[in-house]
Each structure stands twice: as C-alpha cells, then as structure tokens.
Image (cartoon, rainbow, N blue to C red):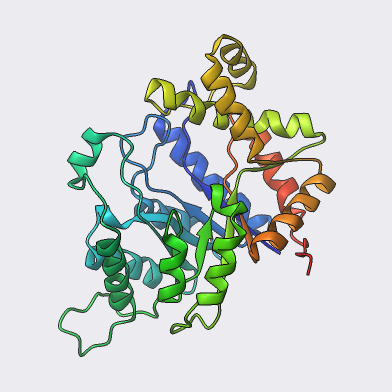
C-alpha cells in the first residue's frame, strides 16, 4: 500500500516560524530517503500554529531539495484563488520538477470571519466551486487554440479533490481522485457511491481514494498516542479559545488537560478516537482495516508532534509499513 505524508508546517513552542518552514523542508528530504510516495503541504491563513499559507511557494523549495518523491498541494484552497493563477503556479512547478507534482484542491474557507474578509471570500457556493474546479482542470489540460492559455506549456499534473461534505459526489462526477478524512473514513455509503458513480476522465480511468488520517507508530500504543496528543490538544482547545496554537510538549499538554473544561477533555477523547496509533503490528492491522473499509489505495499520514526527533522516528516506523495490503 502506498504511504504518503501531509505536513502542515506546524509551529512549536519556543521555535520561530522560519524554524517550522525549515523543518518541513527537512522532513520532505527524509520522506524521500524513506521511500514514501508523496509529500504534500497545506494552505492555512493567519493561523498562529501554522507557518505556511502558500503551498506552491513552499513546494518550490522542497522540489529543489529533493529529486524523486512526488510533491503536492494538500491543498490549494480554490475559493481563495482564481483558477487561472492556480493553474499557472502549478504548471510552473511542473516545469521545474517534471513528473513529480500533484495538485490537491480544497474548498475550506478561513476559520475566522476577519480572515475570510481579508481573503475576499466570506461564503462558499458549492456550484461555483464545482465550476472553478472544472475551469482549473481546463487550464491544466488546455490546448494552444484556447483563448486563455496557462503557461508554461507542460504535461498536466494530476488533480486531486480534497473531499469534505459533498466533495465525493463532485469527485465522482468530474472523474477525479479524492482525498478523504474525518467522518468520511467511516462513511461506507459515501465511498461506495463514489466508486459506483465515478465517471472516467482524461488520465483517470478509474476511481482512486487516499485516506488522510493521523498515524503514529511507536514501541507501545500509549507512547504512540502520546505522540499525537499535542496536535489533538491544539485542535480541541481551539474550539474553546478560538486560536489554533503552536504545538506544546506532551507533559505540558497533560497538565493543561487536567485543568481543562469537560468540553475540551471530551473533544480530546474524540480526537484520539479518530487516530491510528500503536505498535507496528497494531498500526499495520488498523491500516489494512481502513483500506478495506474505504477502498483507499493510499494512506496519507497527517502526523505531527512537538519533538522533531520523535517525529523523525515515527516517520521511519511508518515507512516500514509500506507493504500493507488491503483485505479483499
């Protein structure tokens, strides 16, 4: 089974944003050495806990420091961009790093109203988003006779849809590979419908699903869950504080958790209930079950933790599971 990484360029307490960016580039180099399939980076705007808002710019740096691993946007949030400009940026990346670029497209708006206003997009119209995805694809595949041509002229990089809410329906209708996470990982009706209703498109003859999930491999289940606790805490506490903050050490998160409200503690429990964490054998079994349930051919781990050395060890252990096969 293919195993890939999505790195959100998470900041750490006591580090600068520049440190976080450098850490993402170094992690991509490690992922290549470990033989992982893809390395994607994300787009988040004005978030204290995330240092990168421009995935195509970051990918230019990652591409220059790697040579074989696929690199991609996980994703470009298309409501914040015109399809032409997005197409031009990824075509330029493809010209620089031919045959290695993936274009993951999402529809999420910023998490605060002030940021949405600053980006010029306060609401999302699903029909408008669908038209924008089709327009972007037309620029990626467009020919020289079109009125507007995205340049440079290169082979079109593959397009993936980050599926939230009705995103799987759109991916099936447009014939696009899809990345699923959260509740969709357990929604077999939605994934079955995607495969059933999939309409082949140029370069994509059959459905393809990528399962995005927090995964940690360690010497014990408790240790693996500890690795994921800082990220789960940051998300759970943000719903009460309104701020998604830098990662903190595990011991400090445990202290804060003991003092937290019941609502936050419940959110942490729910968050940990949605991860895959354990020994290599435990994770291997859970990944195989996930693949069998969803039909996904690839796992994209969204793992992050406070200690970068421990993150490196977890990436190495994860890479050792590449031979997982979905149960038929």
Answer left or right for 110 relative to 233.
left
Answer left or right for 73 relative to 300.
left
> Residue 20 appears at what percent x and percent y?
46, 36
Give the residue at the far left of this rendering: 147
Q: Residue at x 44, y 63 (%)?
A: 161
Answer left or right for 205 relative to 228.
left
Q: Residue at x 66, y 56 (%)?
A: 33
Between residue 262 and residue 247, name the one nearer to us: 262
Between residue 27 and residue 3, name the one nearer to us: 3
Q: Is residue 99 above or below residue 178?
A: below
Give the residue at the far top of this rendering: 259
> Residue 17 appears at what percent x and percent y?
40, 32
Residue 12 appears in view? no
Between residue 119 and residue 60, name the one nearer to us: 119
Residue 2 appears in view? yes
Between residue 28 and residue 37, name the one nearer to us: 37
Q: Where, by quadrant of the figure, is residue 221 drawn?
A: top right
Q: Where, by quadrant of the figure, is residue 95 drawn?
A: bottom left
Give the residue at the far bottom of this rendering: 145
> Looking at the rendering, in which quadrant would you find the N terminus?
bottom right
Q: Residue at x 63, y 28 (%)?
A: 269
> Residue 234 appears at what percent x and percent y?
50, 27
> Residue 207 appears at what percent x and percent y?
55, 74
> Looking at the rendering, in which quadrant would you find the C terminus?
bottom right
Q: Where, by quadrant of the figure, is residue 47 drawn?
A: top left
Q: Is residue 288 above or below residue 237?
A: below
């Amino acid at each position: 089974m293919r195993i890939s990484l999505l790195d959100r360029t998470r900041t750490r307490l006591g580090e600068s944003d520049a440190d976080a960016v450098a850490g993402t580039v170094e992690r991509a180099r490690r992922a290549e050495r470990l033989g992982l399939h893809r390395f994607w980076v994300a787009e988040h705007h004005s978030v204290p806990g995330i240092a990168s808002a421009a995935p195509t710019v970051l990918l230019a740096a990652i591409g220059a420091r790697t040579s074989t691993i696929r690199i991609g946007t996980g994703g470009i949030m298309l409501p914040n961009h015109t399809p032409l400009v997005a197409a031009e940026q990824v075509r330029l990346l493809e010209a620089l790093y031919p045959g290695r670029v993936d274009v993951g497209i999402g529809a999420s708006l910023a998490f605060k109203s002030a940021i949405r206003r600053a980006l010029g997009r306060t609401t999302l119209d699903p029909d408008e988003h669908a038209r924008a995805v089709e327009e972007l694809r037309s620029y990626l595949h467009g020919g020289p006779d079109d009125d507007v041509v995205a340049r440079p002229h290169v082979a079109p990089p593959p397009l993936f849809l980050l599926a939230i809410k009705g995103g799987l329906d759109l991916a099936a209708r447009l014939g696009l590979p899809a990345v699923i996470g959260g509740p969709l990982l357990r929604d077999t009706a939605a994934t079955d419908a995607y495969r059933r209703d999939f309409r082949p498109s140029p370069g994509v003859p059959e459905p393809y699903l990528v399962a995005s999930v927090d995964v940690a491999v360690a010497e014990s289940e408790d240790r693996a869950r500890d690795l994921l606790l800082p990220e789960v805490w940051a998300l759970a506490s943000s719903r009460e504080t309104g701020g998604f903050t830098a990662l903190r050490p595990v011991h400090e998160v445990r202290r804060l958790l003991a003092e937290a409200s019941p609502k936050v503690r419940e959110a942490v429990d729910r968050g940990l209930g949605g991860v895959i964490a354990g020994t290599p054998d435990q994770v291997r079994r859970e990944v195989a079950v996930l693949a069998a349930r969803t039909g996904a051919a690839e796992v994209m781990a969204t793992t992050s933790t406070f200690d970068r050395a421990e993150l490196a060890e977890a990436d190495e252990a994860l890479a050792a599971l590449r031979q997982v096969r979905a149960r038929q």
